[in-house]
Every structure is written in C-alpha cells, then in structure tokens.
Image (cartoon, helix red, strand yellow):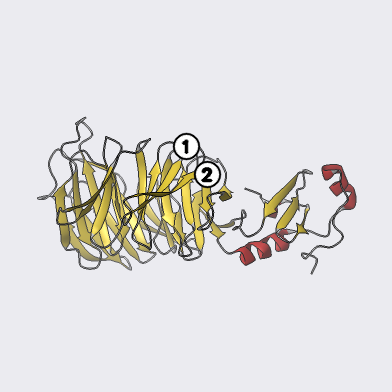
Amino acid sequence: PIEVTASTGAVTFIDDDVLAVLTAAGELVHVRLGVPPVVGTPIVDVADGGLISNDGSAFTEIADDRWVVVSLPDGERTDHGDARSVSMLQGIADDIILRFDRASGDVERFDDGELTYRTSLSDLIVPTATGLGQGFRIGHGVVLLHFRDFSNVDNASGQVIAVDVDTGEVVGELAVPDSRRAELISADEFVHGDFQGGATVRSFDGTVVERLPPFASSVQSFAGTQSGDVLVGLDDGTTLLWSRGDQRVVRRLDGPPLPVVSVQEASDGTIVVQHGSGQIVLWWPDSDDIGSEVVGPVGFTGLAQVVDERVMVSVAGRVVEIPLDVAEWRAIACASARGPVDPTRWRAATDTDPPETSPCEL
C-alpha cells in the first residue's frame, strides 16, 4: 500500500493515466489510474481476527473472552456474551446479530439486542461432527453451518445445515461426506470442496447440481457471481472462474503464491481476492492483469467484506475502508498531497525534472 496520508511529499500527474507519488522518504511511486485506490481510510480501532457485517455497519470481535459488536463508524461497543460458549457470532448489520451457541446447539438472532428467535439444532447435528470448521456463512437470506469431524481422516460425518435468516426455520439438512470449505452461492444452493481437489454444487434438498473436476491445487474458498457462475480460490494463490453453462474454467487469475482465503465479486464485476498473507488484490472485469494490490503482505488479521462500492477489512488493529471508485481515490490522493512538488527533492529521487503542473494544486 502507498500510505499517502503519512507522506509529506507530493502527488502529481505525469501522464493522463499515471499518478506519481513522492514520499517523505524520497521514494517515487507510480500509480496507474483506471484502477481503484491504494489508500484506505481508517475507521475505528478493533481487535484483530473479527468479522465485518454484511452491510459494513458493524465489526464483531473477541475482547476479554467476550463477544463484542463494534458499530461502524462511531465505534460504540456492545457486549454479546461469553465467547467461550458462543463459538460463532456474525452481524448482518449493527442491530441484527446471528450467533451459534456451541454448548446448546442453538442458532440465535438478536434485533436491537432483543432475542428474535432461537432455533435448536441439537437433534440434527451428527454427534461426531463437532467441529464447525469454516462453516458459519450468512448470505442470500440463509445461514449456512458446515460441521466436520476433524478426528476422521475420511471426513465421513461432514454435514450442512441451512437456516432461514428471517424466520429461523431449518431449510436444509444433509450429509456431505468428504467435504471441506462450504459456501453459499445462491438462496438454495451451496458449493463445497472435497479432499480430491474438486468441488460439488448442491441444493439444500441434497440434489447434486453440478460437479467440478479436481483442480491443480486444493480448494480454499468459493463465491457465487452475479451471473450464477462460481469463483474458486486455490491454495497456490490462483483464482478460477468456473462457467456453469460451459462446464469449464473461463478465467484464471494468478495472484501471489499464497492461499486464497476469501474471494468476492463486487457489483461492477471486479473480483476481490484476499490471500493468507493479508494481501488483497483487485482484478478488473476486462483484464487478467493485476489491477491493484490494495493491501500488502501485512499478515492476515480478518476477512475482507465487499460492501457496495468499497472493500472493508481489519488491518493491524484498525477497520479500513478502501473505495473502489477511481474518482474517490484521486480525491483522497490530492487531499493528502501537502504542497506543490519540491523540484530539488524530485530531481534527487528521480534524476528527472518535475512536471510543470499538478491537478492537485487546486
């Protein structure tokens, strides 16, 4: 990332689509426009490892063994129970919270702090499938819980339970042997990986809708696209777009060689890929070139969330908002420039004469 806000250097345009940033340390960085920003806006301090709510208005964290919901952007904190019992808690919004109580097997919804419903899953959960794995996903009006038996190398007791977000009704319960990494892709379908490197799309009634063949590396993450296709993130850093109509991979994105822990599609078709190193890379709909690495290898501290026209993620103890709009990036960059270009510093850093004018000098 280019921390322009921390720089006492200058920002100027050296071409129609190239922005040059001269940092206080004398480093010159070129930023190609037509791509989103590499500058994020810090919103509030948080504990690392939490989750951004679906609408971007809240962040859930664990502090002193308690689940805490942090409202964004004001930072108000609300206690939501003992984190040693409640194994997963996630927000749809700052006033709508869903949680899974490991001890009781209950899924609970709270609206404005009041219990809306409590759905018991204790009679449905296979006794040996005690591990929640990576499976507490909210989307398309459904909560998806994926249980796995971590003591069983064959994973014979893998299980998925789907609960309607609004009513708490169980809308699906099925065994998914040999399963890993379950993810919602629509209101009535989910996809899960297998230990042979492939994946399967299923409906909640148990019907196998489609099978994806084994890939070159193990599957780490999934997402559905607006067109109904499937994004697949692999352990080797590759992201694939699987066309369900063509039954084949139609796009391959070769990112940093580290596991893809999260992949999402923004409303404009931009693909947001997060790696285990914490790096977040944006890929444009019309190009397989890396558009922008908006977060560098700072270490993984929480899953990113695409909300409208921005990416939100916790980085080094802060929730950061990264706009996807080029005009907004330009405004941030220009507002961060402190004064015009210093010719002496520019020549010392670049060995060239500085540009004569800068659109940032308003």
Q: Is residue 103 left or right of residue 83?
A: left
Q: Nearer the viewer, residue 198 or 84?
A: 198
Q: Residue furthest front?
A: 246
Residue 44 x %, y %: 53, 57
Helix, strand or loop status at disc 2: loop
Residue 342 x %, y %: 86, 53
Q: Are marks 2 and 1 in contact (CB under 8 Å)?
A: yes
Q: Residue at x 58, y 64 (%)?
A: 325
Q: Within 10 angstroms of label 2, few (less than 14), some, or many (20 or more) residues?
A: many
Q: Nearer the viewer, residue 239 or 172?
A: 239
Which residue type does callout 1 highlight?
Answer: Leu
> Which mark is in front, 2 or 1?
1
* 54 relative to 212, above or below: below
Which residue type does callout 2 highlight?
Answer: Gln
How many numbered badges does the structure rendering display?
A: 2
Q: Nearer the viewer, residue 172 or 206?
A: 206
Q: Residue furthest left?
A: 123
- Indicate the quadrant where residue 339 lies: bottom right
Q: Residue at x 51, y 42 (%)?
A: 255
> Quadrant location of the C terminus?
bottom right
* Residue 153 visible within the image: yes
Residue 115 x %, y %: 24, 65
Which residue in the structure is indicated by mark 2? 279
* Cα–Cα span, label 2 and label 1: 9 Å
Q: Which mark is residue 258?
A: 1
Which mark sits nearer the N-terminus, 2 or 1?
1
Q: Residue at x 77, y 52 (%)?
A: 8
Residue 57 x %, y %: 44, 64
Helix, strand or loop status at disc 1: loop
Q: Nearer the viewer, residue 286 or 148?
A: 286
Q: Is residue 291 left or right of residue 358?
A: left
